[in-house]
Image (cartoon, helix red, strand yellow):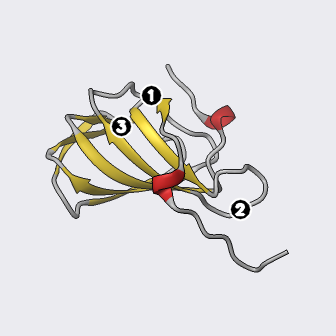
Amino acid sequence: MNNFEVANLNNITPTRCPCGWTQRAFATPGQNVASLHVVNIQEDSRTHYHKKMTEIYLVLEGEGQMELDGQFIAVKPMTAIYIRPGCRHRAIGKLKIVNIPIPAFDEADEWFD
């Protein structure tokens, strides 16, 4: 087994997620410390939280807001957000982001009120 993995996100078919459409690399739960997602947020996403995952968002394109535990934060390209477990969050507006979930993304750790 190699000590590295390589992913070409252009070859990963987008899948639907609560935030829009995502391409997920390194997202096998239990195998990787983190995963990397490119997310195209096409509409306001649903408020959700994670019990175990920390997420780091980096806005690449668009302008909008992040709702973080009820606070609204304006975001634009190169805005980075560190989201701890338990923080209820959602993106508002049309945005393209990089999302780094730690540990690797697990759909079982996506909770909605």
- Within 10 angstroms of label 1, few (less than 14), some, or many (20 or more) residues? some
Direction right: furthest residue: 1
Residue 88 appears in the rendering = no
Amino acid of disc 3: Asp
Viewed as shown, does residue 36 lie left or right of 56? right
- The residue where tag 3 is placed is 69
**Does residue 27 sit above or below 34 in this rendering?**
above
Image side of residue 106 versus residue 12, left or right: right
Q: Residue furthest bottom?
A: 3
* Three-letter code for the amino acid on which mark 2 is drawn: Asn
Give percent across and percent down for residue 89. Answer: 38, 37
Residue type at tag 1: Pro
Per the image, label 1 sits on a secondary structure element best described as loop
Viewer-nearest residue: 92 or 39: 39
Q: Nearer the viewer, mark 3 or mark 2?
A: 2
Residue drawn at (56%, 28%) of the image: 111
Residue 32 is tagged as 2
CA separation, marks 3 and 1? 17 Å
Q: Residue at x 33, y 41 (%)?
A: 40
Disc 1 versus disc 2: distance between alpha carbons?
22 Å
Tag 1 near tag 2, CB within 8 Å:
no
The percent position of residue 88, horizontal first and vertical second, equals 43, 35
Task: Quickly name the residue at label 1.
Answer: 18
Looking at the image, is mark 3 or mark 1 nearer the viewer? 1
Rendered image quadrant of residue 60: bottom left
N-term mark: 3 or 1:
1
Query: At 48% across and 29% down in the image, what residue appears?
Result: 16
Counting the numbered discs, the total is 3
